[in-house]
Image (cartoon, helix red, strand yellow):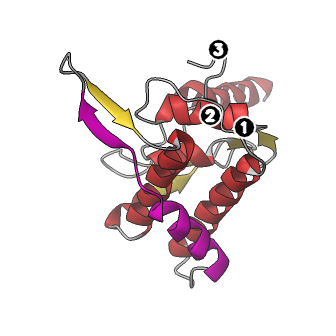
Amino acid sequence: MIEGVRFREGAGRLCLDYLRTLRCGTVEELLDATAVAAWAEQFGPFDAVAVPRGEGRTEEAWRLRESIRSLIDSARQVTPCPAPARRTVNAAAAVPPPVPALDADARLRWRADDPVLATLSLVARDALDLISSPLLARVRQCAGTGCGALFIDSSRPGVRRWCSMNTCGNRAKKESIKARQAR
């Protein structure tokens, strides 16, 4: 595990957890190739992910994230998907995904020539699946002040408002209590 790096999870889909790496639309969590590798290690199937070599890996990860967000927003608004975003996500999804194999101790291990790209392929494939599924109707945007994270509303009535009760929901409830006490 790449030490000290943890990313938020719990949006209900891998692609939505990936979108959370740009918090509040302004706080970038994928600052460099090390952070991209750490995200792939936390969310991918690999035991360890080496920091990829080469230029442009971080920008590629950002472009994929922006393209996924664009496609999800378009699909939710029932507008045509932007061609550049569609090409970016389709290209990422075309990368071979991680391949499972049993080792000598009957443990499942995952292989890929490039674990980061293979994990991003899983993200892109998940986005394509979400966009084309009925579950898209359950995608919500967090009502938390300044948050805006997308999540799957898996509540029975479909009225969940926050990406997380532990953060945004708790904050909103505290603000509501303070406002009532101020009256």
Residue shown at 62% from the left, 19% from the top: 2
Q: Main secondary structure of the magenta part?
A: helix
User: What label does residue 33 carry, if any?
Assistant: 1
Q: Which residue is mark 2?
A: 37
Q: Which three-letter amino acid code belongs to the residue tagged 2?
A: Ala
Question: Left or right: where does residue 173 sit relative to residue 145?
Answer: left
Count the marks: 3
| N-terminal label among 3 and 2 | 3
User: What label does residue 3 carry, if any?
Assistant: 3
Tell me where residue 176 appears, x and y as whole percent: 67, 32
Is residue 68 positioned above or below 79 on the image?
above
Q: CA distance from mark 3 to mark 2?
A: 11 Å
Residue shown at 75% from the left, 44% from the top: 146
Q: Is residue 144 something that shows in the picture?
A: yes
Q: Is residue 137 something that shows in the picture?
A: no
Tell me where residue 49 appears, x and y as whole percent: 54, 29
